[in-house]
Amino acid sequence: MSSTANEVSGTIIKNPVLWADVPDPSVIRVGTAYYMVSTSMHSMPGCPIMKSENLMDWEIVNYVYETLEDNEAYTLQNGKYVYGKGSWAASLREHEGTFYVCFSSLDMNRFYVYRTTDIEHGTWERSVIEGLHHDPGLLFDDGRVFVFHGNGNIRIVELTADATELKKDGINQQLLETERDGIGLRCEGCHAYKRNGYYYLFFIEWPRTGNGRRRQICYRSRALLGPYERKVVLDDDMGYFNNGVAQGGIVDAPDNTWYAVLFQDHGAVGRIPCVVPVSWVEDWPVFGRDGAVPEAFEASLPSSGLKPIVISDEFEYDDNKLALNWQWNHNPDNRLWSVTARPGWLRLMTGSHASSVLFARNTLTQRTEGPACSGSALMDFSRMKPGDYAGLVAMQNRFGTVGIRIAAGGEPYVEMCVNRGDGGEETVEQVRFAGKRIYLKIDFNFRNSTDIALFYYSMDGAAWIQIGDQLEMKYTLEHFMGYRIGLFNYASKHSGGYADYDYFRYDREV
């Protein structure tokens, strides 16, 4: 693509644009900036807001909320949890200078709407509407506000002009019924638009017939309430295990080119976003090139530098506030962690008992990335108490951990533990360890869905000793999330101990 002083030089978009768990993407453009929200479920803070200038290079700039609710399930108390629940499939829109994010929470049976005028740095005002509005698509249309939602039976509801509550006597009805015959998962994940006098509704659908993979569906109508025409606009897996690229919406560029941002199930690493070129033929969107998602293509969008969504951290903070790349597993107890109590270290203190890392408060996590990545940490365990276990975790329902467990007599043992799917914690290998500090590492391999993690420890950070078995990672619906790497510390007998982490260092194979 040639360029002049008035043209954008262009960038090469390579799929996936993020080889990490960023599911259910909802993308808008404001000026030359693109913003995206994605599902975060039980991770806190939640609903990450990412920014890009070219749909390829994304950075985390904000979160919609610090915590969603404050109850026993969200705080991992009394055996309760919200794994795989929390916020699902958020919809992001901007209207007259205000940004809106809405989503439902199955466990709370609520529909949430958040608003801000500053998407990158602002706080969000919250409104709650009782009842589920599954996988909502928000649409502002000539002074009115609508939400399309549902699975198979798609409904439309009208909100007040400020989108904070249902409009009294507004539209609230079934809009259409999507295909049933030969369909396993009927249409859901709605994204709604209005263009050239047409209303467009995009969905994901999973047929049992034909290729038998997820695909992207478009419904369109000249009238808000229909009737709607239907078309399959994308049915492609990029040659990856028949996993269809689908669910998401469309967005334009300043030069009136169009793109879709969708996702693909990619094994244990999670659901990863892809960008697809879109053209228009007789007011129908045409996805991809010859019906396929290109592995790479040139777009008339500006080049920009790589902005990693997973980072190393030396824990050198002036204030007790972590980088945006970190998320807690469930709500943190902010009394029991610090990056200022011991400058240059992250301290994780115990304040309650847990039966395994799945129920450990203040487990601090980041995503993992393909095709392969590694995370390591130096941990000081000198102030841990008998029964405490602290270290690194490959977090999903079928987790793997490596760390130090303090025996009843105060002796430290390095352990590798797993959960094989029954919720319990099994010690695979235990080795007596001398000293007060230990280096820990986990290597992740996601190449071609190999989905293997290996666990190591070291006395000097140079010579690594593998411990335990390799973990065969499985993406399960119990967590509905790709594997994350985390730092944890929990007590099984006595609260009040703590573990200090000097750093977390991350490396990814590109």
Image: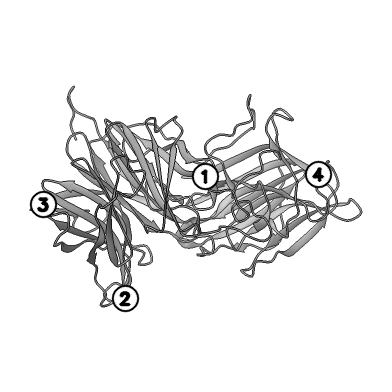
Residue 283, disc: 3
Mark-to-mark CA distance, 1 and 2: 37 Å
> What residue is pinned by disc 2?
208
Sequence-first tag of 1 and 2: 2
Q: Amino acid at mark 2?
A: Arg
Name the residue type under label 3.
Answer: Asp
Tell me if mark 3 has few (under 14), some (14-19) or many (20+) residues whose alpha carbon lies within 10 angstroms of its own: few
Instruction: Give the label on residue 497, or none.
Output: 4
Residue indicated by mark 1? 508
Q: What's the CA distance linking mark 3 and mark 4?
A: 64 Å
Farthest residue, direction front: 169
Q: Nearer the viewer, mark 1 or mark 4?
A: 4
The kind of residue on which mark 4 rests is Gly
Which of 430 and 182 lies nearest the eye of the viewer?
182
Tell whether 188 sits left or right of 490: left
Work out whether mark 3 precedes mark 2 in sequence or the reverse, and give the earlier one: 2
